[in-house]
Amino acid sequence: MSTSVKQSSPPATIRKIGLISLGCAKNLVDAEILLGDAARHGYELTTETDDADVVLVNTCGFIDPAKEESISAILEAHRRRLHGAKAGQKLVVGGCLSQRYSTDLATQLPEVDAFLGLDEIKNAGSFFDRLLDEERDGEGPLVEVSRRAAYIPDYDTPRVRLTASHTAYVKIAEGCNHPCSFCVIPRMRGRHRSRTIESVVREVEGLVASGVKEINLISQDTTYYGMDLWEEKAGPRQPVDEARGPGLPALLDALGAIPGEFWIRLLYTHPAHWSDDMIASIARNPKVTRYVDMPLQHIHDAMLDSMRRETDSAHIINLIKRMRAGIPGLTIRTTFIVGFPGETEEHFETLLEFMEQTRFERLGVFNYSREEESRAAKLSGQIHGGTKKRRQREAMLVQQRIAAEVAASHVGQELTVLADTALLGRTEGDAPDVDCRVHFTKPVQAGTFHRVKVTGTKGYDLEAAPIEG
């Protein structure tokens, strides 16, 4: 996805877009693509939303807290335009919430002028033109939301990057085929669809040539990458052979062969699709960080079965052993859900014991969110909110102690760190925005790699002195 954008025709006046982007990195890439197409139509991004012709709230609709945050952001954007914003300013809602609820929201939120779906980001410029140029008195909001998401970007898709210049997210696939009972992402984002290896490689080559030092590979399930392409060739009745298909190991090998000094980071993997070849592909590629993001959600078999996670505890425990044996120095980030329907104190205690035994380097705990249209919403044994909060608190207290001990174990070590600013950086075991940081004892050049010696800890974070020469 190119960062250079050509305008389709010179605008009479420059129109401005104010962006409020919420949710995950996948949503952020959607916003970057949307802005890329808008720029082709002469639109310019502004950080001052009061000066914008269009304010876009790029929403998250995954769980209740995210939906509540999105609605609050929409209402706040409307409130601001009633008190000093540019005359005629339009309020647009995009992202997952728009894709999922546009019909209902068009009635419930009369403050909103338009709703844009996930597939429509590629035509955002013409959408904004219509919104600003057409008279729509009494017609209600402008709504462009496809029923079934099917879009996937390519290497030359126009894009305005919103991350720091040295780090970028690359979406290698879109959609999800998993049946997790608590999740409605497949309803919003459609079935899994992978880009070709050539497409991803060409995008990464361009990013590295522009000075990017960290490539973060993302999708709903990066470990399913390429398996859908092989299924298309093999036919629906043929078993998927990962070794023969254009899967993630082949992609990592291809990206690892690109010249330059940069990291490749693997985010959003699923335990059901890990293989020994995938483990080996990380181990044999020095540019691939020894870091794996793999949400497990639970460890008790009754919970995994009810969640429809397609794995059991024996598979997970064996997989983690194989990963740590095959990738020395590996950092594993995971997440768990507590308070899922039917979770007993015994189930929860099993989860705590697993955390103690496995000692994940990075871990988050979420309260179960009852999502309408999900299978889990209909399950009996829904857990009281107070119980969910207590379990989350207890689990995080366990992880806080483990994380502090993990951090302390690095004191005295020499590490390579990517500097995000002059005084803050990250190790290869730390993804942007969600993990720990390294505090430098003296300023360094931002956006570059540095060797440091860890001198102490600061909560979850490390303190380190840059090594001269």
Image (cartoon, rainbow, N blue to C red):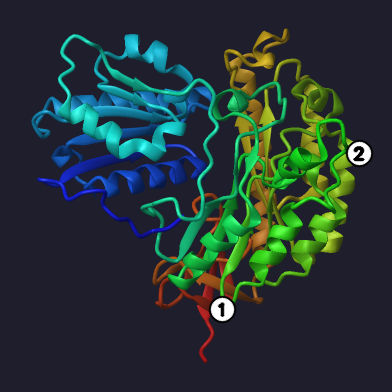
Residue visible at 75% across and 20% down in the picture: 343
Above or below, 94 against 155 in this view is: above
Q: Position of residue 393 (x, y in %)?
A: 62, 33
Q: CA distance from mark 2 to mark 1?
A: 39 Å
Question: Does 363 appear above or below 286?
Answer: above
Picture residue at 62% right of the left edge, 75% below the top? 415
Near-viewer residue (61 or 330): 61
Left/right of residue 131 with respect to residue 292 in the rendered view: left
Q: Judge left or right: residue 184 versus residue 468.
A: right
Q: Give the label on residue 314, or none.
A: 2
Question: Is any atom of residue 266 visible in this view?
Answer: yes
Task: Residue 187 in the image: state x and y as whole percent.
Answer: 59, 22
- At which x and y percent is residue 56? 30, 34
Near mark 1 (Cα within 10 A), the count class, few <14, some 14-19 or many ≥20, is many
Residue type highlighted by circle 2: Ala
Placement of 350 over or under 340, stated as above or below: below
Q: The disc labelled 1 sits on which kind of residue? A: Val
The residue at which mark 1 appears reads as 452
Q: Decide which of 387, 280 is in the foreground and name it.
A: 280
Tell me the residue at 63%/36% (across/down): 365
- Marks 2,1: beta carbons within 8 A: no
